[in-house]
Amino acid sequence: MTTSPSPEILAFGEAMALFVADVPGALEEVADFHRRIAGADTNVAIGLARLGFRVGWLSRVGADSFGRYIRHTLEAESLDCRHLRSDPDHPTGLVFKERAEGGHDPHVEYFRQHSAARQLSVADAEGVDFSALRHLHATGIPPALSASCRELSRHMLTQARNAGASISFDPNLRPGLWSSETEMCQTLNDMAAQADWVLPGLAEGRRLTGLETPHDIAGYYLERGAQAVIIKLGPQGSYYRGHLAGKEESFTVPGFTVNEVVDTVGAGDGFAVGVVSALLEGRSPRQAVRRGNLIGAQAVQVIGDMEGLPHRSRLNELEANLD
């Protein structure tokens, strides 16, 4: 029986075993890979845990060596895995990633069609103590995986909202996983309407809302119940519009210069770590967006999805150098 306190932050979704090519080139030409883990939701969970928050992870992995590897890796990052189930009937998902060159997005291939994570359902949340929850982080990936994952996503947001926890939502669009554009937009916009802090990229916001400017995209979600919308603008930084400080305000915070972009995968997750952690600490919206930009810039300078996410001592150093 678990005797440790319930997590104050909970994330849920899909974790996969990641194999990153050792050398540039097409995957079919690469013989050697490094093993890591992948998953937008786990990236954020790990990033928040590294900053000292008590973070829980809800998911399924296969009862196989890759599932055990993921569990051990997450536990080594101090994640609470009491809600991580081993599924004896379905395998852990795999993903292979090219070695990126010149700052371009690397080619990625997924093997997840019958994965354990796609079997997630409301039943997997039966043991969650939502009354102990301070914050829930959600993305648009779980609802894209299957109908039962969609139901779980709705359940998680509803229960967290009813319990008074704050909610952050990153759309993390995966159009290829959806049966239609209409279903994707409707489902994710409904989820965003239940969140306090919505964190789309600019292209994602345009696709989901049909609107063009950051101001109008943010307004779309504010009108539906969000307290703040923070839109990622890539190297240009981020745009904020919301009323977290008791009054509505909007502004753009420029991005940080990076000498060499090594791997862009995970940059948006690093941004979410920065924004969410700062807001949970009571920082101002401008400070939160700046931290989001800062951690996002760290994430693109290393190979791997979460390797560039800083621990608290490193973040303190980075922020001290800015002041």
Image (cartoon, rainbow, N blue to C red):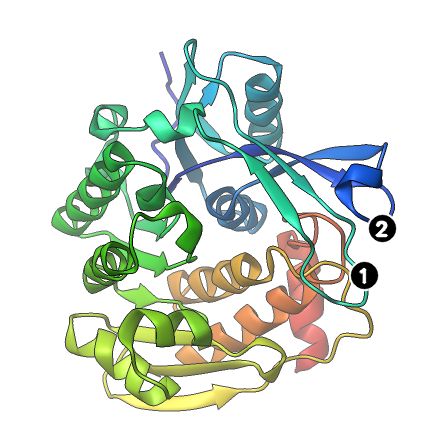
Q: Residue at x 16, y 70 (%)?
A: 225
Residue denoted by label 1: 101
Q: Nearer the viewer, residue 284 or 202?
A: 202
Where is residue 268 shown, x and y percent of the image? 53, 62
Question: Marks 2 and 1: in contact by CB < 8 Å?
Answer: yes
Per the image, label 1 sits on a secondary structure element best described as loop
Please say if 162 is above or below 283. above
Instruction: Please say whether residue 82 is visible from this viewpoint.
Output: no
Q: Amino acid at mark 2?
A: Pro
- How crowded pointer 1 is (Cα within 10 Å; few <14, some 14-19, many 20+) is rated as some
Query: Split into 4 quadrants, where in the image is the C terminus?
Result: bottom right
Q: CA distance from mark 1 to mark 2?
A: 7 Å
Query: Split into 4 quadrants, where in the image is the N terminus?
Result: top left
Q: Nearer the viewer, residue 123 or 298?
A: 123
Instruction: Please say whether residue 149 is visible from this viewpoint.
Output: yes
Q: Quadrant of residue 95?
A: top right
Does residue 57 appear to the left or right of 34 in the view shown?
left
Where is residue 228 shown, x and y percent of the image? 30, 74
Residue 150, numbered circle: none
Where is residue 231 shown, x and y percent of the image? 43, 76
Per the image, label 2 sits on a secondary structure element best described as loop
Residue denoted by label 2: 24
Q: Residue at x 43, y 61 (%)?
A: 276
Q: Residue at x 26, y 64 (%)?
A: 196
How many numbered discs? Answer: 2
Please say if 104 is above or below 244. above
Q: Amino acid at mark 1?
A: Glu
Where is residue 115 shown, x and y percent of the image? 45, 25
Q: Residue at x 29, y 87 (%)?
A: 216
- How crowded pointer 2 is (Cα within 10 Å; few <14, some 14-19, many 20+) is rated as some
